[in-house]
Amino acid sequence: MSTAVTNTAPTGERQVQHHPKDTLLRDDRLPHIWCPTCGIGTAVSCFVEALRESGIPEEKCVVVSGIGCTGRVAGYLNLDSFHTTHGRAIPFATGVALANPDLHVVVFSGDGDLVAIGGNHLINAARRNMNLTVICVNNFIYGMTGGQCASTTPETARTSTSPRGNTEYPFNVPYLMEACGASYIARWTVLHIRRLKKAMTEALNKNGFAFVEVIAPCSTLYSRRNKLGTGYDLMKFYHDNAEIRHGANTKDVGIGFQTKIIVGKFVDITKPTFLEKYQGKTTGGGK
Amino acid sequence: MKLWRTPLDADKVRVPHGVVSIIIERCKGCSFCVEYCPRDVLIISKKFNKKGYHYPEVISAGLCVDCNLCEDICPEFAIYSDPEEQHSTAQTKENA
Ligand code: SF4
Ligand code: SF4
Ligand code: SF4
């Protein structure tokens, strides 16, 4: 097959080699490693669009990821980005944000990396209202390491380390984040592309700790082990079972195994960030 | 679309038309674009790419409204649409 651009008139599509989003992607790395029907790619697609809409110049945006399937995001974005060790994306990002407060620092990682391995960093960054945008792709399982049970795996779901069904109580991540003091909390599935994009734009422009939970299919491990079909079937599941409830009490938004998923913008408050307080700008200059 | 009355500005309102572009070798055949296109412009092709995935194909080019949904939902950055005018003006420029 020739590699030239061919305009195939009869069917109506153009066959091309480049995508308009390629300017923000390391297109020499594409196709990426994510499995067919995995939802992470869609989350990245929404992020690229959100970054454009936010008006933040590319050179002012830094993306930090940890380890895992979602941890690969930093490597696919054509921005200043860093791929840290497992769970340590937030401490690294905190350093970047404090050393250079003009930057918009984004942490883009998975549930296993952020909520379990790096859980302590997550809660403390939220408590301090550190000026970070955290995008957490929650697919309910450790993907890259082999489908182990995570702290976000719903009860009764099967994983490679819970072959008879998970018996642990999972984290309700938005509730955890609100309790810790995050300024902005939203949750969407990758099916809600427009709303997810808007939430990411708002989170990017939020002064303070902004957290966006993205519910996404892991086709190879989570859906296969639980016999839920592929990511395509999970998208249909989201379509039928996601309920939009803006301002919902985060206490009520926990996720069970194949139960209703409550999505929306849950928290959006304004309060001084860590740096503002530290510099005494909002505390009357008291040392 | 059925209208109760013809809008006064009906002659000025234009439904946008889009032209779909596909990067065949990036597609992993998830069918998200085919399933969620609001105008059923796409189908999964019988042909497959080098990696063996069936990629989408346009069956009703005239129906595309350039909503960009396929572009945003595609996890592979393999499909997008842009306004028809962009292509026609490019062509006119070439012809000129
Ligand atoms: S293992 Fe799961 S999360 Fe990782 S790329 Fe595959 S589908 Fe996505
Ligand atoms: S731009 Fe919209 S209407 Fe056109 S093919 Fe894509 S999803 Fe369908
Ligand atoms: S959404 Fe993308 S990867 Fe999926 S079938 Fe369409 S073009 Fe291929």
Image: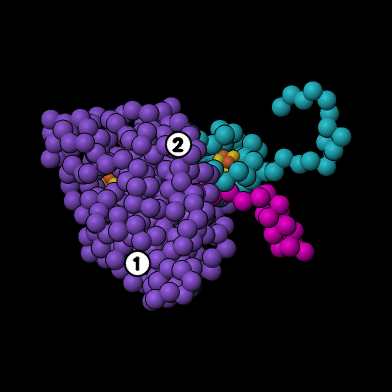
Same-chain check, marks 2 and 1: yes
Q: Name the colour assigned to chain B in the rendering.
A: cyan
Q: Quick check: can you spot residue B68?
A: yes
Residue tagged by mark 1? A93
Label 2 lies in what chain?
Answer: A
* Residue at (45% x, 51% y) in the render: A184
Compared to A62, does A150 lie above or below? Answer: above
Secondary structure found at label 2:
loop
Q: Earlier in the sequence, mark 2 or mark 1?
A: 1
Q: Which residues are magenta?
A: B72-96
* Residue at (39% x, 39% y) in the render: A250
Q: Which of the two residues, A150 or A231, is positioned nearer the viewer here?
A: A150
Q: Name the colour assigned to chain A in the rendering.
A: purple
Q: Are marks 2 and 1 in contact (CB under 8 Å)?
A: no
- Residue A248 within the magenta-colored segment of the rendering: no
Depth check, mark 2 against mark 1: the one in front is 2
Residue type beneath disc 1 = Ala
Residue tagged by mark 2? A248
* Residue at (73% x, 63% y) in the render: B93
Residue type beneath disc 2 = Ala
- Residue B89 within the magenta-colored segment of the rendering: yes
- In the image, residue A125 lies at what x, y percent? 33, 60
Image-based side of A210 in relation to B61, left or right = left
Quarter of the figure with residue A119: bottom left
Label 1 lies in what chain?
Answer: A
Report crowding for label 2: few under 14, some 14 to 19, many 20 or more residues within 10 A (C-alpha).
some
